[in-house]
Amino acid sequence: QVQLIESGGGLVQVGGSLRLSCAVSGRTFSIYRMGWFRQAPGKEREFVAVIDWSGGSSYYTYSVKGRFTISRDNAKNTVYLQMNSLKPEDTAIYYCAVAPTAREYEYWGQGTQVTVSS
């Protein structure tokens, strides 16, 4: 059984920062990449950022470039999302996901709420 435990969400004012964490636990398997997604009320889930587990290459959706940074700790099987200069439109439930291969994300976290107040 694989578990993704997210933490770090909360309420923050416009321009503030939050750091999300997602730790993978359970049975041992290789991680190919980990990503962050978000879903705002009434909207579909959207991609936010992804990081390749071996090389560390990262990619972001355009709306968060320059504000969010994804990073990883291979030894701890943990991925982070540092979110700076937060805007009201960043309000959403944030989910982490892990892809054991290049094909698809197979495991998802339970989600953590991020609310940016103006």
Image: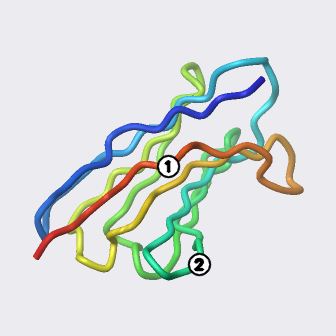
Residue behind mark 1: 111
Residue placed furthest toward the front: 42
Across and down, in percent, residue 48 comes to 52, 67
Across and down, in percent, residue 20 comes to 38, 45
Q: Amino acid at mark 2?
A: Glu
Q: Is residue 91 above or below residue 110?
A: below
Residue behind mark 2: 44
Q: Residue at x 32, y 69 (%)?
A: 91
Q: Quadrant of residue 24?
A: top right
Q: Is residue 39 above or below residue 16?
A: below
Q: Residue at x 67, y 49 (%)?
A: 52
Which quarter of the figure is the C terminus placed in?
bottom left
* Closest to the observer, 2 or 79: 2
Total numbered labels: 2
Which quarter of the figure is the N terminus placed in?
top right
Q: Quadrant of residue 86?
A: bottom left
Across and down, in percent, residue 114 comes to 32, 58
* Closest to the observer, 53 or 78: 78
In contact (CB < 8 Å): disc 2 and disc 1 = no
Q: Secondary structure at mark 1?
A: loop
Tag 2: Cα neighbours inside 10 Å, few (<14), some, or many (≥20)? few
Q: Amino acid at mark 1?
A: Gly
Q: Secondary structure at mark 2?
A: loop
Q: Residue at x 42, y 81 (%)?
A: 63
Earlier along the polypeptide chain: callout 2 or callout 1? 2
